[in-house]
Image (cartoon, rainbow, N blue to C red):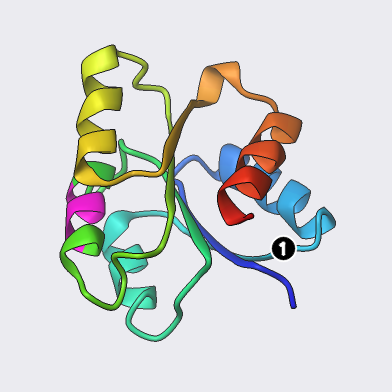
Amino acid sequence: MASKIIIAEDDQFVAKAMTTKLIKEGYEVKTVPDGVQLMEILKSYIPDLIILDLLMPKKDGFEVLNEVKQDQKLKKIPILIASNLGQVNDIQQVLKLGATDYIIKSEFTLEGLVQKIKNILK
């Protein structure tokens, strides 16, 4: 059975590139443009992994990460942060909040993303 991934990303180009690559790799993918919609979809759909952007409209990734990790039903879902915030303190903060791993969008390839996901879901 295909692993289910939700991508929370407000940049449509990035979201589409990730989605296309992950579907080709055999994953089931849903995409949401902001944190509010992500929290909404999580009420009825539990993914195997969330790819989360930090800078999104309505509710940012820091808030979402915090909410997911406080929720008994959701807190075990691995969260891969995909952001252009590359400062060490941002990375440390999200890892402290419970993120599984972190990629800097401007520095990663789609192949690298797939490899990270495979490692997380093993």
Q: Main secondary structure of the magenta part?
A: helix
- Residue 8 image offset from top left, x and y in percent: 44, 53
As drawn, is 112 to the left or to the right of 4? Answer: right
**What's the residue type where badge 1 is placed?**
Tyr
As drawn, is 3 to the left or to the right of 85? Answer: right
Image quarter for residue 114?
top right
Q: Residue at x 29, y 78 (%)?
A: 73
> In what quadrant of the picture does the C terminus appear?
bottom right
As drawn, is 48 to the left or to the right of 65? Answer: right
Which residue appears farthest toward the right when viewing the image? Answer: 24
The one of 58 and 94 positioned closer to us in this rendering: 94
Residue 4 visible in this rendered orientation of the protein: yes
- Residue 5 image offset from top left, x and y in percent: 57, 62
Residue for badge 1: 27
Residue 58 visible in this rendered orientation of the protein: no
Extent of the magenta region: 63-67
Judged from the image, the secondary structure of the residue bearing numbered disc 1 is loop
Q: Give the number of marks.
A: 1
Q: Residue at x 26, y 63 (%)?
A: 36
Asked if 94 appears above or below 122 in the picture, the reply is above
Q: Residue at x 76, y 59 (%)?
A: 23
The one of 50 and 78 positioned closer to us in this rendering: 78
- Residue 32 image offset from top left, x and y in percent: 45, 60
Q: Residue at x 17, y 50 (%)?
A: 63
As drawn, is 100 to the left or to the right of 114? Answer: left
The one of 88 and 12 positioned closer to us in this rendering: 88
Image quarter for residue 107?
top right
Q: Is residue 36 magenta?
A: no
